[in-house]
Image (spheres, coloured by chain):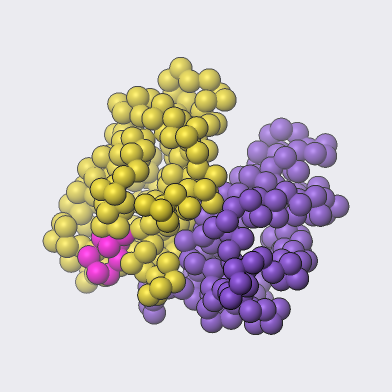
Chain colours: A yellow, B purple
Amino acid sequence: MTDLKALQTTLLFTEEDIKALRQSKAILADQTDAILDVWYGFVASTPELVHFFSDAKTGRPDGAYLEAVRKRFALWVLDTADANYDQKWLDWQYEIGLRHNRLKKNKTDRVPSVAQVNFRYIPALTIPVTTTLKPFLAKKDASAADVEKMHTAWVKAVLMQSILWSQPYIKDGEF
Amino acid sequence: MTDLKALQTTLLFTEEDIKALRQSKAILADQTDAILDVWYGFVASTPELVHFFSDAKTGRPDGAYLEAVRKRFALWVLDTADANYDQKWLDWQYEIGLRHNRLKKNKTDRVPSVAQVNFRYIPALTIPVTTTLKPFLAKKDASAADVEKMHTAWVKAVLMQSILWSQPYIKDGEF
């Protein structure tokens, strides 16, 4: 928890960002399906990304796997907007990291997919995730300034999570 | 270079971003000293960060080391704005990563500083670096829309570089 605080300081992540994330929850709550349609459209049109949902043998995208992850992704949007950074949340981030890494990928859904999501895509996905989200933040009655604040808070929050998810990929003692 | 292209696709990094970065060069070129004053002010006021410039024995910040890095940081701003992504550039990013990692930190300046910059701070610094830069992008005669475009391009470019710099920290075969 102390290291998380230091990471938040480095990310310029403040109480204002927590407020903005929580403000975004009510705006996004009934839009997660539409957000996921855009998000899955991006993944489907990017061979480098759809690869991570493919059957390791045939190379074909696994529809059932994509659907199972989609359900968790919707919950993740709301969980990120909750911005409750306690030890339980931190443990869960570590678990999410493991599920991207070769240590635990495919186990939850018992799928014969490729062995890992390569590290480099994890922090990179901060950009398409938060870019996808921005128009949805603007769809309700928030002011343009509030939309900017919520978007900035989301960029920081997703980058922070992607850093935490990277932990299983890092050599011992270097995280 | 193929993997770099795939990473850029994931980052939604396009020709528009390259144009915006190059537009920023003329704006930033005569402001690097002022930018570095703000940047070093942030580092100096953040114990978690100034730690990486400290003498490993005394724990005190090493002024000569800070000054040597400052000169390279100014060059890095202009290099990032150049946005010339060739093999030479890619090799140089790997070298920058090594110089943050325990494999090569302190060697260039022959300083008795702490052994490494921990991984987690590297992608995180994308936020303060690009937030510091934004007011400087607005100080010349670029339109508000162009300032937004340049800032967005900088966020993508710095995140991309921080991912490349992370390579020496990643377990074999997981990058």
The residue most toward the right is B30
Which one is in front, B74 or B37? Answer: B37
The C terminus of chain B sits in image quarter: bottom left
Give whichever of A152, A42 is nearer the camera.
A152
At horizontal 76% and vertical 61% (from top left) the residue drawn is: B74
Q: Position of residue B62 (x, y in %)?
A: 69, 69
Q: Which residues are magenta?
A: A97-104
Residue at (44, 71) in percent of width and height: A174
Question: Which quadrant holds the N terminus of chain B?
Answer: bottom right
Q: Is residue A102 magenta?
A: yes
For residue A41, which quarter of the picture? Answer: top left
Drawn side of residue A104 relative to residue A166, left or right: left
Q: Is residue B140 left or right of residue A71?
A: right
Kindly indicate the quadrant of the structure image that contains residue B59.
Answer: bottom right
Can residue A24 be seen?
A: no
The tally of labels here is 0
Q: Is residue A156 magenta?
A: no
Position of residue B120 measured from the top left corner of the image (x, y, whole percent): 47, 61
